[in-house]
Amino acid sequence: MIDDAIRLDVRQGVYLDGRWEDTSGTGTLPVVNPANEAVVARVAAGVPDDLDRAVAAARAAFPAFAATPVAERKALLERIHALLLDRAEPLAQVLVEEMGATITHARTAHVPLAAAHVRVAAELLADYSFLTLHGTTAIVREPIGVCGLITPWNWPLYQITAKVAPALATGCTVVLKPSELSPLSALMFAQIVHDAGAPRGVFNLVNGGGSDVGAAMAAHPDIDMISITGSNRAGVLVAQAAAATVKRVTQELGGKSPNILLPDADVARVVPTGVMAAFRNVGQSCSAPTRMIVPRARLAEVEAHAHATAAAIVVGDPGDPATMLGPIANRMQYDRVQSMIAAGIADGATLLCGGPGRVDGHDRGFFARPTIFSDVTTTMRIAQEEIFGPVLAILPYDDVDHAVAIANDTVFGLGGHVQGADLDQARAVARRIRTGQVHINHPAWDPHAPFGGYRRSGNGREYGVYGLEEYLETKAILGFAPPTGS
Ligand code: NAD
């Protein structure tokens, strides 16, 4: 359960100019525990007036914060990192309540990976050059200004730190609008930034809906950059609203990521890993490898391993450490997953396991059944549309060129996977996949590897030095150095 200290922060609503304040509005956002559908908290809903106050605070704080010595910003990030680790357990528990992460996954992934973004941003500051000389010209990298950060519900804390950490590292000031469906971990994060001693106005938080507070952020004349992670729909609306003020827009949007099993792949090993990668976080990951592209000659073997893997998945109470998959994070997403399972059946894919409806034994809670379709073709909706749930599509191929063609037959371009024993062949195929990341043989997560999409998966990159540079402007000062010989 959420302890009283957290509930206290929840009532506060808006964090701006270094303190918790009441919102100017009267509405609240209900936070629903997806495992039992109970309302666990009500968060004050911000309104555009709160946003104006937050932006004014961020604008006022910008000149001084942009001019802070790098060592001060590094120390601030290190304090935030230490507090994230100190409060890891309450953060993990809040993630269970607000979006149904299993406690084990929250403890081993949601929280530590979120903290890693902060650690990496601090480490980068140790040797990042904000000024380089090219002959007599200096190239100066300067913070872009006030940043509006809009985040989704699927990896709530992780998406927040992926944006806030590099923004603060560069000397930008920020206004964060977390998902209205998962605002509790964001409130705890705001308290952490406060307790870490961030100067007033450097970090501000306004909760609220996308169509009011989010849209107002995108259009705000005093915000210099928007970074949004969310659906394609919201990403397009933000870009349209931002266009009139010519602000920079970074979008991390949807995906339909392929996982090519090359003919020499060890099927007994890579099919179980591939199924579990697709179902990680109940399939609610933008880069989840949801299209398993397999040699037609090995389809029966693949199906047997996939079926056995799905049958062994323990779905249930996310608070139980033994649970492997919890519920879908909210009703809207559960309904969407159900409609896509129905579409797979209607389009004639072979239902290997799972299917419509709740997991047996659950009358309440958004517990979707881990579902695998085989014999999927590229024209089916389940091969083209992002589902964002525990639904895997297996597509057979005839030769490697055909596999690559299937992999690239999508409007998205976020993640990609290749499995194979011959590393040279796997590398060659990885080069042909049109996505922002490709993983060969399920490597470890790399917080320095740039993350972002080709095509409709977005614009810009997050993580590591590429993520840092999204928040920087580039200034050339000609004549900065005296000509050589003078
Ligand atoms: P969503 O688009 O509904 O909401 C995301 C955020 O955008 C929320 O904070 C929401 O309030 C805000 N928003 C919605 N409409 C807006 C508008 N008109 N103007 C401004 N802000 C608006 O997405 P979601 O359902 O919360 O998240 C799931 C989606 O996010 C999936 O499509 C997934 O693929 C994508 N995602 C992408 C990445 C990535 O890095 N590429 C990572 C995680 C999630």
Image (cartoon, helix red, strand yellow):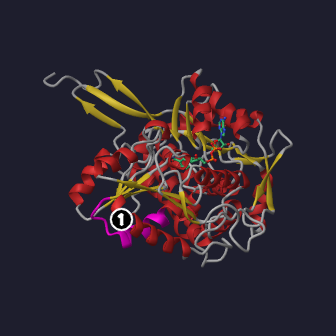
Residue found 41% across the figure and 61% down from its top: 445
Q: Give the range drawn in magenta.
A: 262-277
Image position, residue 369 (x, y; %): 63, 65
Instruction: From this view, report whether residue 168 is shown above or below residue 37.
Output: above
Pick the residue in front: 196 or 344.
344
Which amino acid, mark 1? Arg
Image position, residue 226 (x, y; %): 56, 35
> In the figure, is residue 196 to the left or right of 308?
right
Pick the residue in front: 115 or 325.
325
Residue found 63% across the figure and 72% down from its top: 315
In the image, farthest residue toward the bottom:
322
Q: Is residue 275 magenta?
A: yes
Q: Classify the position of ligand 1 by quadrant: top left, top right, bottom left or bottom right.
A: top right
Quadrant where the C terminus sits is top left
Image position, residue 32 (x, y; %): 76, 58
Residue found 76% across the figure and 41% down from its top: 46
Indicate the quadrant where residue 443 lies: bottom left
Image position, residue 476 (x, y; %): 34, 25
User: Would you say residue 129 is visible in this rendering?
Assistant: yes
In the image, farthest residue toward the right:
26
Quadrant where the N terminus sits is bottom right
> In the figure, is residue 58 to the left or right of 468?
right
> In the figure, is residue 132 to the left or right of 239?
left
Pick the residue in front: 260 or 226.
260
Q: How crowded is mark 1: few (under 14 residues within 10 Å), some or many (20 or more)?
A: few
Please tell me whether the stretch drawn in magenta is mainly helix, strand or loop.
helix
User: Would you say residue 56 is visible in this rendering?
Assistant: no
Number of dots carrying numbers: 1
Pick the residue in front: 249 or 265.
265
Q: Does the magenta stretch include residue 108?
A: no
SS for tag 1?
A: helix
Residue for badge 1: 298
